[in-house]
Amino acid sequence: MSSLSPARAEPPRGLPAREGAVPSFEQLFVDHAPFAWRALRRLGVHDADAEDVCQEVFMIVHRRLATFEGRSSIQTWIYGICVRVAADYRKRAHRRHESPSDDLPERSGPANQHAELEDHEARALLDATVRTLDDDKRAVFVLFELEELPMTEVAVAVGCPVQTAYARLYAARHLVEAALRRATSGRKVT
């Protein structure tokens, strides 16, 4: 994203902020918006709505940045906001109605469509599988396996002891592996 400079006021990603070391909102957005977008997608926000819901997250971040206490890393704090905003989104998503349009956008296909299609299908399968997990298991699985946060930070983000987080991860892995096996058992591997 952006290059790190020695005079940077914020702590390295993943470390708790120190008193007075909270970055500017602009820098925080640049550094953490991709993480928030991925987290929201994995928390059940549809592709079409992810950008808008991510904007909601950063409106909350902007309002509350001055009250950030540094008890966790900024990334963990933002993830907590993502969890709450995604939960609100899922509650109201069934009430949304989109109106179809007669005009379809024109698209041209990339040269390597087959590989991209396989990647897209694999991501879609993983997303669908992760969406079947309950919120507690999903949060731990996404943060540890997909976002690669340390388990101590994951436990802080989801508000549980480290051992409980490991138990949720083990259960989530088991469910994801079983679901992926079922989904791919009928496919021909090339």
Image (cartoon, helix red, strand yellow):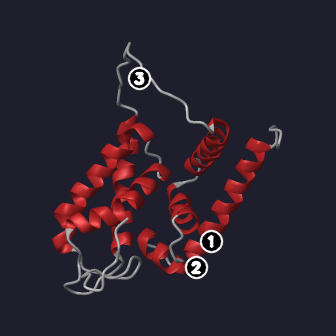
Q: Residues within 10 Å of mark 3 (few under 14, many from 20)?
A: few
Q: If the image is split into quadrants, where does the C terminus sit? A: top right
Which tag is nearer the camera, tag 3 or tag 2? 3
**185 to the left or right of 56:** right
Quarter occupied by residue 102: top left
Q: Are marks 1 and 2 in contact (CB under 8 Å)?
A: yes
Q: Residue at x 50, y 28 (%)?
A: 108
Vertical comparison of 120 with 76: above or below: above
Inspect the image, locate mark 3, and give the three-letter code of the amino acid beneath it: Pro
Q: Amino acid at mark 1?
A: Ala
Q: Which mark is residue 110?
A: none
Mark 1 secondary-structure assignment? helix
* Residue holding disc 2: 163
Per the rendering, the mark at residue 105 is: 3
Q: Position of residue 55 (x, y in %)?
A: 28, 50
Q: Earlier in the sequence, mark 3 or mark 2?
A: 3
Q: State yes or no: discs 1 and 3 in contact (Cβ < 8 Å).
A: no
Residue at image mark 1: 167
Q: Is residue 28 left or right of residue 138?
A: left
